Amino acid sequence: MEQALILSNDFNFILINFRPIKFKIKNYRKIFKIEKNTYEDKVTILYLYYPSFKILKNNYFSKVIEKKAFRVLHQYCKKDKIEIDLIHAQSIFDAAFWALSYHEEYKTPYLLTEHNQFTLRNVSKQKIKKIDAVLKKSKFNLVVSDDLVRQFATNYFFGDFINVGNAVDEKIFNNCNRTKSEYFEIITVGAYAPIKNQIKTLRALQIIDNLNYQKIKFTWIGINAWGTDCMEEVNNLVRSFQFKNIQIELVERASKEQIVAALQKSDVFVFTSLCETFGVSPLEALFTGLPVITTQSGGVNEFITKENGIIVPVKDFKAIAENILKILNKELQFDHESISKNAISGFGIKAFREKMIPIYNKSIAS
């Protein structure tokens, strides 16, 4: 939605969400119906509900349902005098499959951007075969980092991929209102999950805590951001470390404005993920002028430099602690304004527009 908003002065965007719902009497009125919403009064959002059956899983019935969904969408667009010139699928699973099928039905061109980890675990042979067609028939295959190119190659997909990176809105994330706390503030943003490996952050903090430094605070924002209630588990985990000196603040969820305010009063952002495709939250931290200490989790090496942070090996919590202490003791110092300026230059609104507008124009014209 945010990326569509960035480009909304140049293109008219309609975000289409195909939503499966169980085939039940109470859902009958919703099936094959479209609900409309808007984002920031500029981007139209459509939710198209289609029936999901536990029993009928074969390809024939899936095709029947798919074609019916497309007819409903096509009729809706025709009624509103909307002509779809290009489809942009934001992931192969399952958005690009819908895009391919719509292309085959109505000859509408499409392209895709892969944001997510690309793995074929638990993916059917039928879908794996379809991926070949998706990649071959799209106008452009975009990725958010070179690491995703490697992930595709690991799974034996060797197409031409264009790395367009990601985008952050500098109107929200910026260094304009940086403040100074009475504490030395360490922060991370991310849902609690094994792949994010936040336990290594806590182990790094334990090393620092044992050195008896005073006035240190650690804030962890977004623990339940992925929709699962993990607060009790996280609280128990934090209590198990028995921190004596470091003050801990745990935040289930937060608005962007709340995240920005927390980043702007912090001294260092810590990110201990095992595997990423890009790493949006460290980039958001850079936009606010905050230096980042991150593991080599993928994608981050495309925007972390010696001028804005440190990259350490995955799982190396001792290196995390060591570099936090260097910043605490002013052995490592960073220029907040320069960090923010350079991050915005590479991944802000202007940079994203310059990457995407030519790709859209070429896709539509060809």
Image (spheres, rainbow, N blue to C red):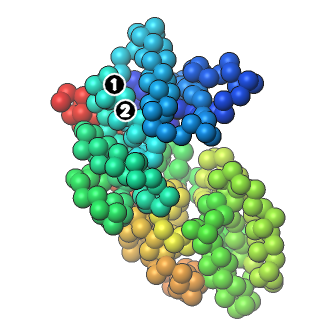
Q: Residues within 10 Å of mark 2 (few under 14, many from 20)?
A: some
Give the amino acid at mark 2: Ser
Q: Which residue is denoted by mark 2 in the rendering?
A: 101
Mark 1 residue element: helix
Give the amino acid at mark 1: Glu
Question: Which one is in front, 72 or 307?
Answer: 72
Locate residue 339, reporting x and y percent. 44, 63
The quarter of the rendered structure image containing the C terminus is top left
The reply to whether residue 198 is visible in this rendering is yes
Locate residue 133, reporting x and y percent. 29, 43
Marks 2,1: beta carbons within 8 A: yes
Q: Which residue is denoted by mark 1 in the rendering?
A: 105
Q: Is residue 246 left or right of residue 22?
A: right
Distance from Cα at disc 2 to Cα at disc 1: 6 Å
Locate residue 255, reporting x and y percent. 66, 46
Question: Which one is in front, 360 or 150?
Answer: 150
**Residue at 50% from the left image edge and 58% from the top image edge:** 122
Question: Which one is in front, 176 or 292?
Answer: 292
The residue positioned farthest toward the left in the image shown:
366
Q: Is residue 252 left or right of residue 113?
A: right
Q: Residues within 10 Å of mark 1 (few under 14, many from 20)?
A: few
Q: Is residue 4 left or right of residue 109?
A: right
Locate residue 262, reporting x and y percent. 65, 58
**Residue at 71% from the left image edge and 54% from the top image edge:** 228
Q: Is residue 140 above or below residue 246?
A: above
